[in-house]
Image (tube, grey):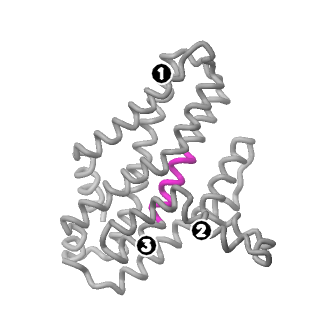
Amino acid sequence: MSNYIFADLKRIIKRIPFLISILLINLALAGVLLFAHGSNWNSVYFVICVQNFSQVLPIILGLIVLSAVFADDFKAKTMQVAIGTGLSRGAVIFSKLIEVCVLTAFSIFTIGVVAFGMGGILHAETIASQNIEIIQFLLKAGSAIIGYCSIAMILMFFTQTTGFATLFYIGLSAHIVEGILEIFTDIKYIQVLNLKRFFFSSLVETVFTRMLLGTIDVGGIIGMIIYIIGAVAIALLLFRKRELEF
């Protein structure tokens, strides 16, 4: 399994489109901060700019990671070849989750370097608590990406194509799916159950909001982990019953 992961990551890191996409995201952040720099510039404004930018990362960066991990693999049928040579379907799914985590962490790290680098260049003069806030904003975006990718993997492995799963990911990260579910959770007799607090996005929001306030939401963190493990388990259950498409 480790050879499969390393081979995949090596292939992805060498892909020019992936590298260009990450570069463009970092350039966009630098551009936003340069544009915001002016007479009203201060550390608070800088933190707000990074926070606002981090809010779009689950959609933009998440799609890049999802495509990098799955698109070429399904197109070239390397996953089928790996299974044909003895790698279990569970190992393939778990490998993909690890790849999503590694690429997300790598991308978020580069964005963090650019954010703090630009803060230094533009003399934002942030204090320690503000730097921690920025790190938490980026960790929140990274956690959302990993969670949404995990859930999208259910459709990814069931259909063995990226089309519907990509649209589903957009629906998750743009909160479209959540909006549809709220139609039902807002029904009078269901509303009292407050089911919205169990949405993955709600768990992420609660965990990192409380973290900013200096507390740790253990229940929320466990809930996020359950979502990811549950999504992987469902993906494996469905994938085991599917014939491989060559």
Return the residue at label 2.
180
Q: Mark 3 points at which residue?
A: 154
Q: Which amino acid does label 2 sit on?
A: Ile
Magenta stretch secondary structure, dominant: helix
Tell me: 186 left or right of 42: right
Q: Is residue 149 magenta?
A: yes
Q: Which image quadrant: the N terminus?
A: bottom left
Compare marks 2 and 3 and give the one earlier in the sequence.
3
Pair 3/1: label in front: 1
| Label 2 packing within 10 angstroms: few (<14), some (14-19), many (20+) | few
Residue at (48% x, 54% y) in the render = 145
Q: Give the range drawn in magenta.
A: 139-150
Give the image location of residue 116, x and y in percent: 50, 26
Residue 149 in percent (x, y) is at 45, 61
- The type of residue carrying mark 3 is Ile
Observer-nearest of 103 and 149: 149
Classify the position of the C terminus by image quarter: bottom left
Q: For label 3, count other residues whose C-alpha is less than 10 Å away and answer few (under 14), some (14-19) or many (20+).
A: many
